[in-house]
Image: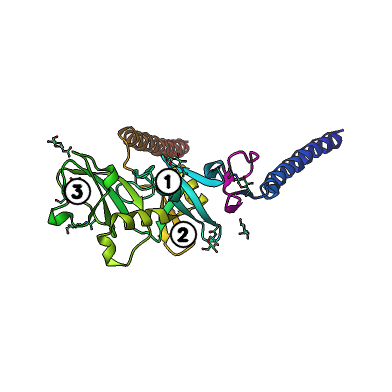
């Protein structure tokens, strides 16, 4: 009777186990079942990327692209970029801001800001602007015409954005240098471009600026880095050679006050417990010693 019961139990357990393994295998196979999607010239959209409208479970929702008029679009908060190429081997995308794309020389500022003012990619799904390490145009808006200033020689006027009382310039920045805008000017946007080795590009013409922006830039992606960021750690680029490698580091966060108090409370409570234990042990031994002495003295008396 007992063995019968345990047999039944183990059979049920086995079934559950097999069922679970099956589900796992199914889930893993599902990824491979998805065929790659295609949009215009990008005919190889596959994991981790997915095209909006693909069956759920195909690709990673964090890496969703959309297809508009046969153009593949990536939205990196809050900008819109045409995807010109996907290299799965190197884990890089070639992007062109829709505002600077060919047929759309509408003359505008970048559609968003891929990088923050320190030049780091702002989106946790993407890290590292390749081949354009520290290479970008800063768009600055000034309240006065600074074109004639000697210090503003590297400021290229963007005529169509410049109005009386508001002057917009593009400044090429080839290094990760701290950019101190002219008085009366402030940085309004940043657009990465490929690293230029030609020193003349420090003072490019408006046409040259537009051509560079139209050519676009590379951005790297990494699921490991995404997961790292989601886990509250910081992900930094370890090697800029393609494919980029990253290290995930625990962020050196300062303890909050309540966390500090909690630790102190823990130490205090732990110390008290340890003290009580030590006292307990002492009392125990002292008592044992006394009873032994009492016992021996009573035998002496006898
Ligand atoms: C498409 O991408 C896969 C990797 O995701 C790669 O193995 C394959 O060679 C690519 N095909 C083309 C035509 O680029
Ligand atoms: C997109 O491309 C397909 C085939 O390449 C073509 O049939 C279709 O008309 C195109 N659509 C648009 C909106 O250009
Ligand atoms: C993407 O880049 C690879 C290598 O740089 C190149 O071989 C391929 O032709 C490019 N694909 C497109 C659609 O531009
Ligand atoms: C031009 O830019 C606007 C605004 O960014 C965008 O909505 C539109 O799709 C672009 N058009 C083309 C042809 O790229
Ligand atoms: C700014 O000044 C420069 C030189 O002084 C001049 O050529 C240019 O037309 C001025 N720009 C505007 C928008 O007034
Ligand atoms: C632009 O030129 C000024 C003066 O020549 C210089 O101080 C500044 O660093 C330059 N800015 C950039 C981004 O190269
Ligand atoms: C620019 O604005 C100033 C005052 O705001 C005015 O005196 C000047 O005539 C304006 N110039 C043009 C070209 O509109």
Looking at the rendered structure, the secondary structure element under dot 3 is loop
* Position in image of residue 228 (x %, y %): 47, 47
Residue found at x 19% / y 50%: 180
Q: Which mark is residue 245?
A: 2
Left or right of 86, for residue 136: left
Residue with the mark numbered 3? 181
Residue found at x 60% / y 50%: 47
User: Is residue 56 inside the magenta stretch?
Assistant: yes
Label 1 and label 2: CA atoms lie apart by 35 Å
Question: Who comes first in sequence, dot 1 or dot 3?
Answer: 1
Residue with the mark numbered 1? 104
The residue at label 2 has a CB less than 8 Å from ligand 1? no
Question: Who comes first in sequence, dot 1 or dot 2?
Answer: 1
Q: Nearer the viewer, mark 1 or mark 3?
A: 1
Question: Who comes first in sequence, dot 3 or dot 2?
Answer: 3
- How crowded pointer 1 is (Cα within 10 Å; few <14, some 14-19, many 20+) is rated as few
Q: Are marks 1 and 3 in contact (CB under 8 Å)?
A: no
The residue at label 1 has a CB less than 8 Å from ligand 4? yes
Q: In the image shown, does 6 or 158 lie closer to the viewer?
A: 158
**Magenta residue span:** 39-60
């Amino acid at each position: 009777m007992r063995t019968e019961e345990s047999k039944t139990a183990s059979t049920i357990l086995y079934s559950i186990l097999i069922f679970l393994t099956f589900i796992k295998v199914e889930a893993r196979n599902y990824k491979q079942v998805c065929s790659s999607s295609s949009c215009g010239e990008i005919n190889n959209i596959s994991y981790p990327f997915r095209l909006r409208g693909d069956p759920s479970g195909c690709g990673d929702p964090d890496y969703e692209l959309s297809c508009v008029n046969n153009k593949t679009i990536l939205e990196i908060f809050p900008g819109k970029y045409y995807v010109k190429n996907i290299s799965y081997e190197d884990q890089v995308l070639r992007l062109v801001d829709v505002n600077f794309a060919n047929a759309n020389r509408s003359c505008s500022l970048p559609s968003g800001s891929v990088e923050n003012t320190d030049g780091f990619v702002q989106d946790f799904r993407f890290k590292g602007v390749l081949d354009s390490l520290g290479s970008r145009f800063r768009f600055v808006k000034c309240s006065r015409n600074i074109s004639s200033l000697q210090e503003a020689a590297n400021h290229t006027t963007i005529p169509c954005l410049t109005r009386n009382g508001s002057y917009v310039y593009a400044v090429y920045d080839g290094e990760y240098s701290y950019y101190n805008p002219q008085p009366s000017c402030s940085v309004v946007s940043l657009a990465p471009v490929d690293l230029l080795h030609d020193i003349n590009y420090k003072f490019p013409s408006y046409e040259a600026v537009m051509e560079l922006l139209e050519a676009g830039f590379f951005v790297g992606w990494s699921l490991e880095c995404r997961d790292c960021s989601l886990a509250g750690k910081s992900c930094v680029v370890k090697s800029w050679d393609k494919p980029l490698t990253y290290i995930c580091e625990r962020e050196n966060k300062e303890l909050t006050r309540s966390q500090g108090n909690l630790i102190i409370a823990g130490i205090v409570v732990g110390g008290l417990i340890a003290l009580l234990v030590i006292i307990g042990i002492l009392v125990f031994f002292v008592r044992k010693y006394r009873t032994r002495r009492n016992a021996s003295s009573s035998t002496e008396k006898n």
